[in-house]
Amino acid sequence: MQMGEDIWYTAQRNHMVDRQIAARGVSDPVVLDAMRRVPRHLFVPENLQDDAYDDCPLPIGYGATISQPYIVGMMTALIKPKPGDRVLEVGAGSGYQAAVLARIGCRVTAVERIPELALLAQQNLMHAGVEGVIVITGDGTALPESEGPFDAIITTAAAPDVPPSLTALLADGGRMVLPVGDRDLQVLTCIHKTGDDLTVSHHGAVRFVPLIGAEGWTPV
Ligand code: SAH
């Protein structure tokens, strides 16, 4: 049965990548290949495994969600990840986004403020056999500059403004993607750092759970 299940999930996953991600314009083969290889159903609650490849976010507990597959694909492509890159993720949640980056060959530090979710991310990554991710419990907007520099930063929770502590952690030539806006609706924002210059581009409306912390929102 295990073998049959694996084939079934693999078929669903390839369908997800073809129809939801590649068909909508994400073309980076490095990203598409990684998303074909990470078993997303191992990063959702057991009772939702059959929905893991649907075109939507899913609840993972503690008010958090695993993002819609297309959003993961788009955000990952925007930071142009390469094998060996040092990447910071703020908002580890289920660990899925970190797993996609690790499959690409990035060295990932994933920060999560809720200890139970940090543990969940660690367990999911281990269960899925993904190596190359360090999960840290804490506020990703309060990291010391000595943690950096990172070639890329991906923030999967919604910030009121671009956190200065994160741009400070970006390497020269580094890329950062994050949702910026109000608590209910944000614009996907991409930042390229060249020397001291930051170039900003926008990539459509998104809805993420709030980034809560020193340079985020206060808890309600
Ligand atoms: N990328 C995740 C989903 C993230 S949901 C995945 O692939 O499953 C957003 C997560 O950001 C939540 O788990 C929330 O607890 C976390 N979060 C919010 N503010 C944070 C902060 N300041 N530092 C670290 N994590 C934060």
Image (tube, rainbow, N blue to C red):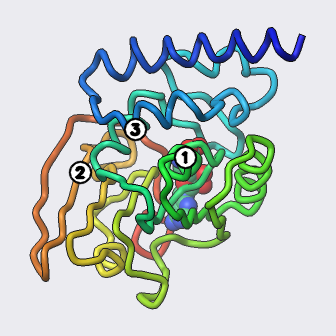
Q: Which of pointers 2 and 3 lies earlier in the amino acid sequence? A: 3
Q: Does the residue labelled 1 lie within 8 Å of ligand 1?
A: no
Q: What element carries label 2?
A: strand
- Residue 46: image tag: none
9 relative to 173, above or below: above
Where is residue 201? Give x, y as percent: 13, 51
Which residue is rendered at x = 38% and y = 63% of the image?
Answer: 153
Question: Does residue 153 appear anywhere in the picture?
Answer: yes
**Residue on which disc 1 sits:** 103
Does residue 29 appear left or right of residue 190 in this picture? right
Q: Which of pointers 1 and 2 lies earlier in the amino acid sequence? A: 1
Question: Does residue 220 appear anywhere in the picture?
Answer: no
The disc labelled 2 sits on which kind of residue? Thr
**Dot 2 crowding, Cα within 10 Å, few <14, some 14–19, many 20+:** many
The residues tagged by marks 3 and 1 sit, at their Cα atoms, a distance apart of: 9 Å
Locate the C terminus and report the quarter of the image it occupies: bottom right
70 relative to 89, above or below: above
Q: What element carries label 1?
A: helix
Where is residue 195? Give x, y as percent: 13, 81
Which residue is rendered at x = 74% and y = 41% of the image?
Answer: 128
The residues tagged by marks 1 and 2 sit, at their Cα atoms, a distance apart of: 24 Å
Where is residue 44? Give x, y as percent: 70, 32
The disc labelled 3 sits on which kind of residue? Val
Whether tag 1 and tag 2 are in contact, CB under 8 A, the answer is: no
20 relative to 109, above or below: above
- Residue 189: image tag: 2
Which residue is rendered at x = 22% and y = 53% of the image?
Answer: 190
Q: What element carries label 3?
A: helix
Residue in front for this viewpoint, 211 or 39: 39
- Residue 31: image tag: 3
Q: Does the residue labelled 3 lie within 8 Å of ligand 1?
A: no
